[in-house]
Image (cartoon, helix red, strand yellow):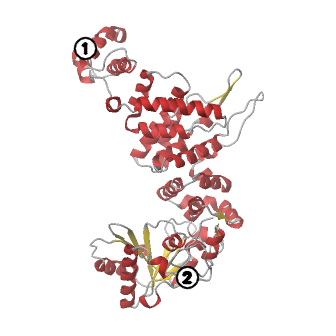
């Protein structure tokens, strides 16, 4: 369970749920202290109750890194933000008048100012209705009790806690509970269901049973939430130390059938003639967790999530071989075009995932047999700038429980990577293409743009990668002239 700071200077985990002031915790960072005290003095000057709220308070209490400062006022949040920005000598304020919030883009931390408010969604609306309220009412409409904690930052009451729903006690228990009836909480903003599984992974907390049941009942409400917001929660879940927690919970509650149906159908094992196969869903999440242990790079973790996305549609049983998934690498690459469009992924991330999915079997194949320089060069050329990421993904993909196989694969991976560390070879393969370009081929052979030009260019590249010819213009030109008739006739 996560340890919670006490208000003593030593910050031991001996914590009292009856604590009433957290000034030592709020002032343990000079930058945070300056911002909070400046905002508190401004609130006092304007006669506006001013608080630090939500995730900032939670993370401070749990001794977790804090990246954003969320300030709430019982007044005009946008107007307060503009005045605070001036006090902090920041010229830019991004305001969202409709929602009563504003962002102050500080160089070192993002500051959000919000009006104490309630947000509700009508049954058929994608846009919430926002009304101002008191801090206590604002806490009631928060997603979870651990996020429904505030502390005053006014000078005369700095650090005084407001914890109307026992969030600190729930934090100690390591549980996620909604302040009010979960059906109401999730109906007001269905994205909170995705936030529940994300927080469960990030904080390694348990979602209490009646909240889980509410999510299962209301999962279809996600239809009113934009894909951008849903995808953002998926990405945040992937950044957790153990992302699988979130995805197992999505599966359990039925959320996965909506947010990632391609993953939802991965689970289960078929057996024919006493021959079964790995549960692809369990394997995938093992790979994701392995990747999380190897790297903080979210893109690689996302690649781990989708690398076997085409195994369900390519699963076949062959009498002699058993279960096969022929072509799942290439078919998975194609599937990700549709997935990327639905999830509103950036073109760069979509293309990255497509490349990684297409190539994820290649280094593993190398590790299973004798390694040749030409095979290594070919993988390096196709992976390009993503080569190191691909090797991390492939190491993460080793989930066998057979220690002899693991030892063999790792040893061969080490050999492959030692070859790939050749700086000259890496630079050469990263920018690799035929020395005789398409324009040269068309001019020399009097061809028009078309398929045959591409076939000739690829033949030259294959010959270089296979070590048949040197990677220079003259050798490539001579080779082209020797093979052109076979392609053109």
Figure disc tally: 2
The image quadrant of residue 429 is: top left
Mark before the other along the chain sequence, 2 or 1: 2
Residue at x 52% of width, y 60% of height: 225
As drawn, the residue found furthest toward the left would be 443
Q: Tell me if I can see residue 116 in this picture.
A: no
Q: Residue 178 vs residue 460: left or right?
A: right
Residue linked to disc 2: 137
The image quadrant of residue 47 is: bottom left
SS assignment at label 2: helix
As drawn, the residue found furthest toward the right would be 274
The image quadrant of residue 320 is: top right
Q: Tell me if I can see residue 161 in this picture.
A: yes
Q: Using the image, determine if residue 42 lies above or below residue 444.
A: below
Q: Quadrant of the N terminus?
A: bottom right
Q: Residue 187 vs residue 303: left or right?
A: right
Residue at x 21% of width, y 18% of height: 443
- Of residue 96 and residue 266, the one placed in the foreground of this image is 266
Image spot of residue 373 (x, y percent): 42, 22
Residue at x 45% of width, y 40% of height: 389
Q: Using the image, determine if residue 338 lies above or below residue 3.
A: above
**Disc 1 residue crowd, few under 14, some 14–19, many 20+, Cα 10 Å:** few
Q: Quadrant of the C terminus?
A: top left
Image spot of residue 158 (x, y percent): 46, 86
**Disc 2 residue crowd, few under 14, some 14–19, many 20+, Cα 10 Å:** some
SS assignment at label 1: helix
Q: Residue 464 vs residue 473: left or right?
A: right
Residue linked to disc 1: 445
Q: Residue 365 vs residue 212: left or right?
A: left
């Amino acid at each position: 369970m996560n340890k919670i700071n006490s208000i003593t200077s030593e910050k031991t985990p001996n914590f009292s749920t009856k604590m009433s002031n957290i000034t030592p915790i709020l002032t343990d960072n000079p930058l945070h202290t300056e911002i909070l005290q400046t905002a508190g003095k401004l609130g006092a000057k304007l006669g506006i109750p001013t608080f630090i709220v939500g995730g900032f308070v939670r993370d401070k209490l749990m001794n977790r890194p804090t990246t954003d400062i969320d300030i709430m006022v019982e007044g005009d949040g946008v107007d307060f933000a503009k005045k605070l920005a001036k006090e902090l000598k920041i010229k830019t304020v991004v305001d969202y008048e409709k929602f009563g919030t504003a962002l102050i883009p500080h160089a070192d931390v993002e500051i959000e100012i919000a009006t104490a408010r309630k947000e509700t969604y009508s049954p058929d609306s994608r846009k919430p209705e926002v009304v101002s309220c008191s801090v206590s009412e604002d806490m009631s409409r928060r997603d979870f009790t651990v996020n429904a904690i505030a502390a005053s930052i006014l000078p005369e009451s700095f650090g005084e806690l407001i914890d109307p729903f026992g969030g600190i006690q729930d934090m100690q228990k390591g549980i996620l509970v909604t302040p009010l009836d979960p059906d109401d909480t999730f109906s007001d903003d269905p994205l909170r269901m995705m936030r529940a599984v994300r927080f469960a992974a990030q904080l390694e907390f348990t979602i209490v049973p009646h909240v889980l049941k509410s999510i299962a009942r209301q999962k279809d409400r996600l239809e009113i939430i934009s894909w951008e917001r849903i995808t953002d929660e998926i990405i945040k879940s992937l950044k957790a130390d153990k992302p699988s927690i979130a995805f197992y919970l999505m599966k359990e509650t039925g959320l996965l059938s909506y947010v990632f149906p391609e993953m939802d159908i991965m689970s289960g094992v078929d057996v024919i003639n006493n021959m079964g196969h790995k549960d692809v869903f369990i394997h995938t999440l093992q790979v994701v967790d392995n990747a999380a242990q190897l790297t903080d790079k979210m893109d690689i973790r996302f690649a781990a999530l989708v690398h076997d996305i085409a195994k369900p549609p390519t699963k076949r049983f062959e009498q002699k071989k058993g279960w096969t998934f022929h072509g799942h690498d290439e078919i998975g690459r194609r599937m990700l075009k549709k997935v990327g469009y639905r999830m509103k992924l950036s073109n760069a991330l979509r293309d990255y995932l497509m490349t990684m999915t297409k190539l994820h079997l290649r280094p593993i194949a190398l590790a299973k047999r004798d390694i040749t320089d030409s095979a290594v060069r070919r993988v390096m050329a196709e992976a390009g700038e993503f080569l190191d990421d691909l090797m991390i993904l492939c190491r993460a993909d080793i989930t066998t429980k057979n220690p002899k196989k693991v030892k063999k694969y790792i040893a061969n991976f080490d050999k492959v990577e030692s070859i790939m560390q050749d700086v000259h070879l890496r630079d050469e393969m990263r920018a690799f293409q035929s020395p005789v370009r398409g324009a040269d081929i068309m001019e020399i052979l009097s061809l028009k743009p078309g398929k045959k030009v591409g076939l000739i260019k690829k033949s030259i590249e294959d010959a270089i990668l296979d070590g048949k010819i040197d990677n220079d213009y003259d050798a490539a030109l001579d080779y082209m002239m020797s093979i052109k008739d076979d392609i053109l006739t």
